[in-house]
Amino acid sequence: MLAVLGAVTGVVLLVLTWLAAFDSWTVARADASVLRGFADLRRPAIDQVASAIANLCNPKPFVCLAAAVVLVAVFRRRGRVAIAAAVIMLGANITTQILKPLLGQTHPVALHVARAPQILTGSWPSGHATAAMSLALCAVLVAGARWRPLVAAAGAVFAVAVSFSFLILVWHYPSDVLGGYLVAATWTLIGVAAVWTLDAHLPRPARGSSAVRMTVREALGPPAAAVLGALALVGVVALARPRAVVAYVDAHAAFVVGAAAIGALGLALATGLMLATTLRR
């Protein structure tokens, strides 16, 4: 089954990400360079906004948001999906908290930034990234088919915004973010595989003509709009302060690549899940 294969791939990529981040000096240096780019964005006003966004995935707000996601599935009378979403979010976040001390070690490249907290041993994978991405992916699962593309785009923006925020605050290295995303994606694929297996062997009673047919263009519209919105925002900043932006990009090339990679991965995970569940016949 495709979902099971995806989950296995997620585990393999998780292991490779950890090995690359801690056993490859080249990757570790790039990891620190990307983080330096985020850290150099710090200003009092930016810190306030970043803190507010990052704190959305603290335990109490996360529990409230997770409960809302599960309740949507309950209200839609999708009991299996509700249970799967709850298990995914709980399992992903518990897994991250187990992996932190189990695989905890000091990053090969220390980064010292003024006004930044000490990065503690055992920061991989990121709990905030896991929470944000598991929320985004489960929101896609519980949404109705017609709304799923919009929810996927919004969920990806949310997860990436949370990740960028705590990277600016220097809570984690970028590799911690990738680890958190992969934990969330792996658990989501396990949940999807379980739901699809149950649906195949124990079909739900028909609920009338509720099937929704959607073209690939319709499904990809909102994610594409999210990308264009991000590019437009960058363009506005570049037009407002062209010299400063050019100088910053020139001094932080790794940051540009790393930030783009995190954003692309976040959008790809949410969009891929949306396509798999929306276009599945």
Image (tube, rainbow, N blue to C red):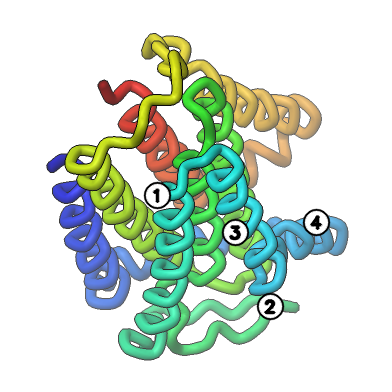
Query: Gap in Å between the C-alphas at discs 3 and 4?
Result: 22 Å
Residue beneath disc 4: 49
> Marks 3 and 1, how far apart in space?
16 Å
- Residue at (78% x, 61% y) in the render: 52
Query: How many numbered circles are shown?
Result: 4
Q: Amino acid at mark 3?
A: Ala
Residue 55 is left or right of residue 97, and the answer is right
Foreground: disc 3 or disc 1: 1
Query: Residue at point 51% right, 62% down?
Result: 129
Mark 3: secondary structure: helix
In the rendered structure, which amino acid carries the disc numbered 2?
Answer: Ala
Foreground label between 2 and 4: 4
Q: Is residue 155 above or below residue 38?
A: above
> Reading the chain from its start, which is encountered first: label 2 or label 4?
4
Q: Give the residue pinned by disc 1.
A: 80
The answer for how far apart the CA atoms under marks 2 and 1 are is 43 Å
| Mark 4 or mark 1, whichever is nearer to me | 1
Q: Amino acid at mark 1?
A: Arg
**What's the mark number on residue 66?**
3
